[in-house]
Amino acid sequence: MLKLELHTNTATRLDSLILESLRGYASTFSRRILKQWFTQGRIKNAESDRPLDPSHKIAPPGCWVRIEGVTEADLHDLTQAQGAKECFLPILFEDENLLILNKSSGTPSLPLSGSETGTAVSAALARAPQLASLSSLAPHLGPCPPLEPGLLHRLDTGTSGVLAFAKTAQEFVRLREAWKSSEKIYRAIVCPKSPHPLPEAINTPLAHSRHSSKRMIAFEAEKMRASEIRGKPLPAITLIRDTRICKSAPEIRLLDLTIEIKTGVFHQIRCHLSANGAPILGDPIYGKTSSTRLWLHAWKLTLPSANGKAPLLIEAPLPEDWPN
């Protein structure tokens, strides 16, 4: 059993105080796990033994709570990524410095807690257990949280394709610093709402929606109010390199786009395409056309070499059921 003393100077929600306290033990502790503990009735008043409500306001100076069935050691395990029994994703490239996997649609890039092993991170750890040591990188070497050891970038759960891991601290730091200059090419199947062609370059800034943590907004200052967003708009550049008509779906007009991104903002391609009248097929957030998956694929990644040789080009073959 874990007993926590919560301190506050102003009336504060109980779940916020507990999350802050738990992240003092484990900085990557997941809000989702805390929510599960509340639902299970495991978080109780230390004196009355009554289950507590997450929205309950705690008055100064604070209170004591206890969490049943949890120890400090458990917190460490919950915030350290665990390897799967085997690497269940295809390997696109591997050497002493890099491991690059072909992530399938529906597979999360990283776990939300250490108990999850069906993620790309878990597959990578099964292949290269030494990745776990990268979570101990010193802050000045760049962030490498324990739940994403060696992970150089992320793909949405519904997105398939190239996912890269650095196997050494030196390679992790080198490629993180060079990531913006790396060439990143995607393919997307979209449902255009009009016959007009899409622009070749989309450079509308993106911002987090104030109303949903899962949604971005293409922010056009002359059309929107700052009150609709959280934080500052972020520069985002999406280039459409090629457009093909999909002939395999005559009942609906679909286009197969080849896309390059010059920035890496959360949901960048999905939000930019939807804002320009061409949501990705199967996108549950920015489009309303249902499908078996989100039809977005990280197709090609070009990484600079460390020794001055030719850049490394990695390509993830299109899924077998990709529309044509």
Image: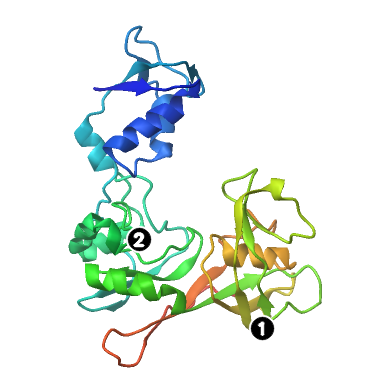
Specify the quadrant that holds the C terminus.
bottom right
Q: Which kind of residue does numbered mark 2 sit on?
A: Ala
Mark 2, residue position? 120
Q: How would you rate the neighbour count of disc 1 (Cα within 10 Å): few for under 14, some for 14-19, many for 20 or more?
A: few
Q: Tell me what residue is drawn at x 61 percent, y 64 percent.
A: 270
Quadrant hosting residue 249: bottom right
Q: Which kind of residue does numbered mark 1 sit on?
A: Arg
Specify the quadrant that holds the N terminus.
top left
Image: 268 above or below 231: below
Image: 16 above or below 275: above
Q: Nearer the viewer, residue 171 or 158?
A: 171
For the residues labelled 2 and 1, say whether their Cβ atoms are less than 8 Å apart: no
Q: Position of residue 207 (x, y in %)?
A: 62, 56
Q: Nearer the viewer, residue 277 or 225?
A: 225
Quick one: SS at disc 2? helix
Position of 248 compared to 263: left or right? right
